[in-house]
Amino acid sequence: MSDLYARHKAVLPDWLALYYKDPLEITHGEGRHVWGDDGRKYLDFFGGILTTMTAHALPEVTKAVTEQAGRILHSSTLYLNRPMVELAERIAQLSGIPDARVFFTTSGTEANDTALLLATTYRRSNQILAMRNSYHGRSFSAVGITGNRGWSPTSLSPLQTLYVHGGVRTRGPFARLSDADFIAACVADLKDLLGHTRSPAALIAEPIQGVGGFTSPPDGLYAAFREVLDEHGILWIADEVQTGWGRTGDNFWGWQAHGRSGPPDILTFAKGIGNGMSIGGVVARADIMNCLDANSISTFGGTQITMAAGLANLSYLLEHDLQGNARRVGGLLIERLRAVAAQLPVVREVRGRGLMIGIELVRPGTDEAHPDAAAAVLEAARAEGLLIGKGGGHNTSVLRIAPPLTLTVAEAEEGAAILERALGSVH
Ligand code: PMP
């Protein structure tokens, strides 16, 4: 055990998860690569859990942060804040939400917490519809709407949460249905639920579940849900913490894959926008955002230093069409991994969109999750210089691939070749 690991264990909570039997300290990064305290260079296919949106040590972001740091880090939101206004203007316009207002927080958890505060206040209801297998953060309220049991050990939340089907297609009573039948079954489930509850404030959902294993709902699922929600005046909150910023290739936001659903009433974001700086936030229609009748600030939400990073990062993303890159390079990677998977019974499914790709592992010949195989592939990939993530439901049996969006074709090929060997070694 390294000295740092021993000190980590002595002073930090037991439940603070660490990857790898021999945990890694990342010392620095550049582009799509990071270096470890073991002196090795790694190709990074997880980007700090999707936080490194463009690239590690992107010169444009470093410059903006350094220049801002030389002026002021933070002046408090009691004063006008130019970079905050500028980033809010850009995000409001990108959100697709009419007459949008933006409120910055410091994390995805806090963004969802704010969304819940808005929805429950606006609708005067503490009932929330959430999806099975969801993950929305780890505050008291965010845990209370997280369906993924591994992350929500208690259910002492003040919210009354009702869980809806639709998050996962590979398991449960609706597994193996066609797209149309799956949507019909989920809508019937939602209608049934609404038949014997009071009036919920909102449905919160990740368009593609992240921690839950990069699940793939059929396009149009949320449009179909929306029709039902609209009949009851129930708000739709899209948690775009993982699916935002063009990562899914075809769309800038995950909700856009659902076409007719239109923009959500409330959208939450975090992770990639700061390229490692902690930025979260909520976008909502003005009437919803302004339903709080108290003055409210977030001490650290929207600090100049984080907003400077966000502006530089977002500009780079848009100017270099990284959404297009995610579509092209991600498309090739998915194709390549599907060809590999076809030879390996341990792989149940390669799924994804753009650079958000899940590889679900099972015990060969069964539908049983195979967390041991996922852990073994993670170690084998690391041994060959590739970092990936894992996730998925009760058992972490899905490999998660979400590299920085500047990934090149050559790097995608290199990573796919390592994954092929790593998957082959557990087979
Ligand atoms: N929502 C989703 C979809 C997430 O994936 C996460 C983080 N994994 C969160 C919310 C919480 O974000 P944070 O960790 O920044 O609080």
Image (cartoon, rainbow, N blue to C red):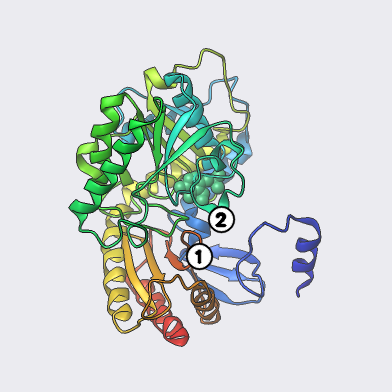
Q: Quadrant of residue 233?
A: top left
Amino acid tagged 2: Gly
Q: Residue at x 20, y 52 (%)?
A: 181
Left or right: 215 in relation to 73: left
Judge the density around disc 2: few (<14), some (14-19), many (≥20) Cα neighbours within 10 Å. some
Q: Nearer the viewer, residue 112 or 301?
A: 112
Q: Nearer the viewer, residue 184 or 427?
A: 184
Spot occupied by residue 188 in the image (x, y as percentages of width and height)? 26, 42
Q: Secondary structure at mark 1?
A: loop
Q: Please tell me whether residue 175 is drawn above or below residue 342 in the rendered image.
A: above
Name the residue beneath numbered marker 1: 396
Q: Please tell me whether residue 164 is drawn above or below residue 80 in the rendered image.
A: below
Q: Residue at x 23, y 40 (%)?
A: 224
Q: Residue at x 32, y 48 (%)?
A: 319
Cα separation, mark 1 vs mark 2, equals 9 Å
Spot occupied by residue 167 in the image (x, y as percentages of width and height)? 37, 51
Q: Please tell me whether residue 380 is drawn above or below residue 54 in the rendered image.
A: below
Question: Quick one: label 1 or label 2, which is nearer the N terminus?
Answer: 2
